Image: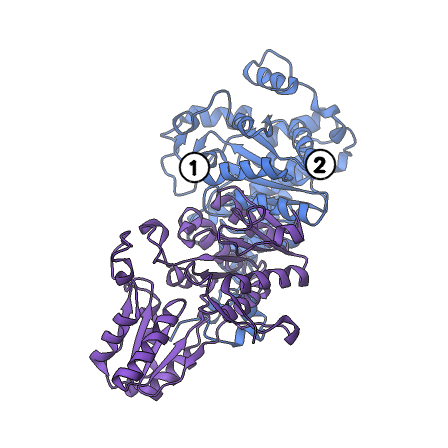
């Protein structure tokens, strides 16, 4: 274990050791006030979008599952803030925040939840399956850890094309016990793939706490040692720390074409999905309240910016108000958008058919009446 | 006429496509330095090097998922399963990520991969290594499946599969790799056999034998005997491609012969032949002079014993017996 890792483990386990001031790290030192406020705005937009979608879900405007990101906003925004032309992102089913953070708009996201043709996937993907390849965002994947080999493949593709980039592959703490993740780590280490696995550890794999679901020594990311892959623990409440450490991992990908495993400590205020009615039984209401009151990443970032003198309570409120308005407008847009027709069902199955190529005209592709 | 082995025909397809498109990458277990478990990729690593021909660990979910992810960025991986039977350890990648990502993204993404390898019984390796999942994967919209019987079709279909912009699963056969047959010389032009086009391997007038893969060869053998010993003229329809499927060729042949025996190495329950039975009764019911009959692998996991395995599989004798019940 490197000196740096020792230090992190120590600071994590012992609050009396004063943490590094990541605000002065090179990637944060050059941030302008506008950029810092923009990150606050992005986090606020994500929270408002999630709150808005929960309200609409409860009104019966959408079907299926709804996995809310509330409480984890700093991660998606912090990571997206570091992405350049050849940096890509892929995640699991808790994907709305990543989508908004890379620049997808609220209208297409809300319309997708509503199952409308104006949705980012034309109403064919739903809450767990948002995509925007033009923004280097590759989903939105519903099977736990199923996206981890895909993230590996994005890194492989970058390397094959000779592009200096990275694939940021997100997953929950429940995904670390899936075989596909371990297979991916082995290949990432073996082939020197520029992928960054980011475990968003909110403490619970659905209703099962980390201690009840995973065998580990000090933390989950430490498993990377077995694959000779660098890893680190990140305090997701500290936006500067998050950016600094993710940036180190991305630079490792860019400069050395080496993978990293990051474990970012975070918390979700709602259940695994909205259907998880038990979430106040497998954890105490006091625990949830403590996180909301003392560990909220948006509030902590706001306080930081206020202390730096670049944000006021009033301007923060204005940002929040505008995020709520944007959400409300997205709900109206989604509501008024048309639903898919039965003819739309068989589009987007085969590239060749959609593009009406010669190949698509040979033989029967669909077996309806 | 140039005759080469089925495995060399495939090898030629890879070599030509590696040369044609720099995004084509051969991947799999033992495909590079070992020259392939069945020597199908022999010499390619030596010629094309580490970047284009890649040995992977025994890690099907990992490397197949990696290939799918890379294909989203425009790489065209041609990935070998040493046995198609090993699909089960990569099933999530094969049916969720490869088949559904295009749909779930509303058509924003496509997955131009080829998965290939042998899918057959008959080599006494027991039930776990004998699965014939062509019907299984053809049941997933978004996937394409083909199963060549001859060296010529093996090369032509493989080239079509590599050029296709959708995921194509090619089911080969270890018992066919050593078969020799005519394959046009590369100097005669690009030999591509389109997916979705069946081939009448033998013309006949009394009954249609409809098959794919190695079963086509059993049908041809049976047809000879049916003609010489029973005076029955059997037409052999080689499907070549399962999805897309050449329904017109099937229906046309049945309308001509009025009888059909479907020969299918997969199991009878919901196998390829079950689907074709449905199509025939939907589209040629009035032309049938007898019930549609099937010769499938006998409905049990594959038996190991070499004394009996060939009898569990379709073979010429079983086909002839079945034909004689309706012709």
Q: Quadrant of residue B210?
A: bottom left
Residues A190 and B219: in front is B219
Residues A299 and B173: in front is B173
User: The disc numbered 1 marks a residue on which chain?
Assistant: A
Which percent across, then down, holds residue A109?
56, 52
- Per the image, the residue denoted by label 2 is A37
Furthest toward the top, the residue is A16
Classify mark 1: helix, strand or loop: loop
Neighbour class for label 1 at 10 Å: few (<14), some, many (≥20)?
some
Which percent across, then down, holds residue B87?
42, 51
Position of residue A105 in the picture relative to residue B3 (left or right): right
Residue in the image at 53% along x and 76% along y: A361
- Per the image, the residue denoted by label 1 is A271
Q: Is residue B18 visible?
A: yes
**Which chain corresponds to the colour purple?**
B
In this view, the mark in front (2 or 1): 1
Count of numbered marks: 2
């Amino acid at each position: 274990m490197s000196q740096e890792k020792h230090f992190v483990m120590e600071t994590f386990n012992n609050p009396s050791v004063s943490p590094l001031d990541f605000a002065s790290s090179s990637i944060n030192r050059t941030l302008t006030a506008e950029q810092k406020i923009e990150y606050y705005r992005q986090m606020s937009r994500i929270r408002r979008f999630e709150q808005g979608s929960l309200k609409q879900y409860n009104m019966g405007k959408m079907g299926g599952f709804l996995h809310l990101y509330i409480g984890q906003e700093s991660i998606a925004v912090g990571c997206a803030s570091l992405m350049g032309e050849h940096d890509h992102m892929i995640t699991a089913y808790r994907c709305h925040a990543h989508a908004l953070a890379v620049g997808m708009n609220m209208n297409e996201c809300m319309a997708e939840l509503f199952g409308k043709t104006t949705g980012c996937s034309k109403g064919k993907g739903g809450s767990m399956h948002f995509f925007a390849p033009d923004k280097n965002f590759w989903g939105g994947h519903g099977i736990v850890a199923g996206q981890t080999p895909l993230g590996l493949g994005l890194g492989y593709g970058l390397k094959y094309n000779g592009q200096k980039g990275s694939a940021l592959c997100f997953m929950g703490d429940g995904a670390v016990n899936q075989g596909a993740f371990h297979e991916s780590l082995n290949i990432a280490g073996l082939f020197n793939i520029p992928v960054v696995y980011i475990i968003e550890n909110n403490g619970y794999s659905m209703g099962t706490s980390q201690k009840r679901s995973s065998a580990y020594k000090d933390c989950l990311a430490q498993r990377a040692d077995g694959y000779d892959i660098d890893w680190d623990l990140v305090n997701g409440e500290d936006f500067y720390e998050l950016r600094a450490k993710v940036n180190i991992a991305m630079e490792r990908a860019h400069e050395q074409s080496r993978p990293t495993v990051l474990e970012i400590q975070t918390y979700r205020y709602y259940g695994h999905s909205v259907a998880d009615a038990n979430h106040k039984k497998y954890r105490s209401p006091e625990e949830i309240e403590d996180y909301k009151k003392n560990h909220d990443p948006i509030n902590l970032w706001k306080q930081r910016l206020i202390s730096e003198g670049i944000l006021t309570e009033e301007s923060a409120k204005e940002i929040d108000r505008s995020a709520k308005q944007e959400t409300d407008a997205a709900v109206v847009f989604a509501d008024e958008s048309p639903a898919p027709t039965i003819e739309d069902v068989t589009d987007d199955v085969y590239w060749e058919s959609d593009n009406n190529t010669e190949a698509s005209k040979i033989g029967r592709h669909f077996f309806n009446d | 006429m140039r005759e080469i082995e089925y495995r060399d025909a495939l090898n030629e397809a890879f070599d030509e496509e590696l040369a044609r498109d720099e995004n084509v990458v051969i991947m799999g277990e033992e495909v590079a330095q070992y020259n392939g478990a069945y020597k199908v990729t022999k010499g390619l690593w030596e010629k094309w090097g580490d970047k284009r021909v890649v040995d992977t660990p025994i890690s099907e979910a990992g490397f197949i998922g990696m290939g799918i992810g890379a294909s989203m960025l425009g790489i065209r991986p041609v990935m070998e399963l040493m046995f198609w039977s090993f699909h089960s350890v990569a099933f999530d990648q094969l049916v969720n990520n490869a088949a559904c990502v295009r749909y779930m993204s509303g058509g924003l993404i496509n997955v131009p991969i080829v998965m290939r390898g042998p899918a057959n019984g008959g080599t006494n390796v027991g039930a776990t290594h004998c699965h014939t999942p062509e019907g299984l994967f053809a049941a997933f919209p978004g996937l394409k499946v083909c199963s060549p019987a001859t060296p010529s079709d093996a090369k032509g279909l493989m080239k079509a599969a590599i050029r296709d912009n959708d995921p194509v699963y090619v089911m080969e056969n270890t018992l066919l790799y050593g078969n020799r047959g005519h394959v046009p010389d590369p100097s005669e032009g690009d030999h591509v056999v389109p997916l979705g086009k069946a081939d009448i391997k033998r013309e006949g007038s009394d009954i249609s034998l409809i098959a794919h893969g190695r079963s086509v060869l059993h049908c041809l053998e049976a047809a000879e005997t049916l003609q010489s010993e029973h005076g029955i003229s059997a037409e052999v329809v080689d499907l070549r491609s399962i999805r897309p499927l050449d329904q017109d060729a099937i229906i046309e042949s049945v309308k001509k012969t009025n009888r059909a025996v479907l020969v299918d190495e997969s199991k009878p329950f919901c196998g390829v032949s079950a689907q074709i039975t449905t199509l025939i009764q939907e589209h040629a019911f009035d032309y049938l002079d007898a019930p549609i009959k099937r010769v499938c692998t006998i409905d049990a996991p594959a038996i190991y014993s070499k004394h009996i395995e060939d009898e569990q599989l379709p073979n010429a004798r079983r086909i002839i017996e079945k034909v004689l019940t309706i012709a």
